[in-house]
Structure formats: C-alpha cells, structure tokens
Image (cartoon, grey):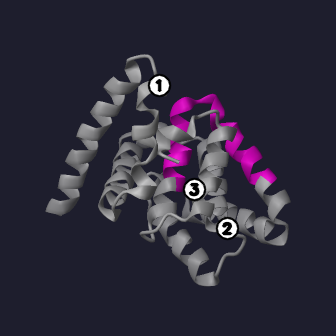
Amino acid sequence: MAMWDKIKDQAKTFQQSQGTRGASGSGQGSHGPARGGRPGSSSGGSKTQLIGMFKSQLASAKNELKSGAYRDASMAMCALVAAADGRVEPAERQRVEELIVSNEVLQNFPADQLRQRFNQHVDRLLANFEQGKAEALQVIAKAAKKPAEARAVVQTGMVVAGADGSFEPSEQYAIREACTALNIPPSEFGV
C-alpha cells in the first residue's frame, strides 16, 4: 500500500508540474523532446509511475466519465491496443477483459456491456484488421467532443497497454492513432 501511495504522490507532483508547464502557452515548444522520451525509453520504474499517474487521473475524473461515448470509445481503444500486433491470444483477451472489468472508472458501467463491446471490436479486428481498425477509430473519435473524456480514453488505453509491464511499439502506434482521432497531441502521452 505504501508504495502505491508513494507513486500517487509522485504522480500528483508530476501532474502539477505538467499543469503549470502546459499553461505557459507553448505545449510543445521547448518541452517537446524532454517529454517525448519518458515512457518508452527510460527505466521500467517511471513507466509504472506513469501508469499509476494515469490510473489516479482517471479515478479523480470517475464521476464525469459516465457517458456512452466514453464507454464505447475506451472499449474500442482497449481492443485496438490488445490487437495492435494483429493477433490476440485467448489468454491476452481474457487478461484485458479482467483489467477492464476491474478498472475503477469502468465500474461505472455493467461488466457485460464492457465485455460485449470489447470483444466485438477484437473480433472485427481479427477478421479484417484494417477495417476493424477504421471502425474502432470512428468510435474513438466520437469522444473527441469532450476533451476530458478524450484524454480519459487514451489514459485507459495506456493503462491497459502498460499492464503487462511492456509497452510494445505496435501498442504505442495504436495509441498515437487514437490521439490523432481525438485531436490530442500524442506527445502529451509520451508516444
């Protein structure tokens, strides 16, 4: 528990520094390179920290994340991440399902709704990857109207992608594509 609290504290400080940094006007500018390298290239510890930060950011927005658009977009996001390399082993599908139904924020929705939407997207991606991806990105794009929801969709994807301790290039690419669909600069998430 203590370690989790420590991560949350670090995440809070990190969040505050991000906040003030973003407010200075140049979101990209001088901060671009420094921000970009963080999740992938640095040690595993900071990745865990980052995932922890996304989890706590999501938890703090839990009450606002009750719309169907967020639910559907985050399930499409999770499916894209799970199928990012073009295949989904049954064990991986099950693991992601468990992550989804145990996710604090996604508990705003009935588990069977989440499973159904996630599996529907995974099935489409496996049947025809390009077509399935286009459909998933369309669903994701519907969350773009509300910036807080849009960010939460990407954060949900990051939490799922990073849950196995590794963040594959194909998963990073899927998250970049989702960012584009949501009009969010991928650099915000270090991808």
Residue 172: image tag: 3
Magenta segment, which residues? 134-157
Image point 46% across, 68% down: which residue?
A: 166
Residue 24 visible in the shown view: yes
150 magenta-colored: yes
Q: Which of 26/49 is in front?
A: 26
Label whose residue precedes the other's in the sequence (2 or 3): 2
What's the amino acid at mark 2?
Answer: Ala
| Secondary structure of the residue carrying numbered label 1 | helix
Q: Quadrant of residue 104?
A: bottom left
Image point 32% across, 37% down: which residue?
A: 15
| Secondary structure of the residue carrying numbered label 2 | loop
Image point 65% across, 50% down: which residue?
A: 72
The residue carrying mark 2 is 83
What's the amino acid at mark 3?
Answer: Gln
Cα separation between marks 2 and 3? 12 Å
**Is the stretch drawn in magenta largely helix, strand or loop?**
helix
Q: Which of 40/72 is in front?
A: 40
Cα separation between marks 3 and 1? 22 Å
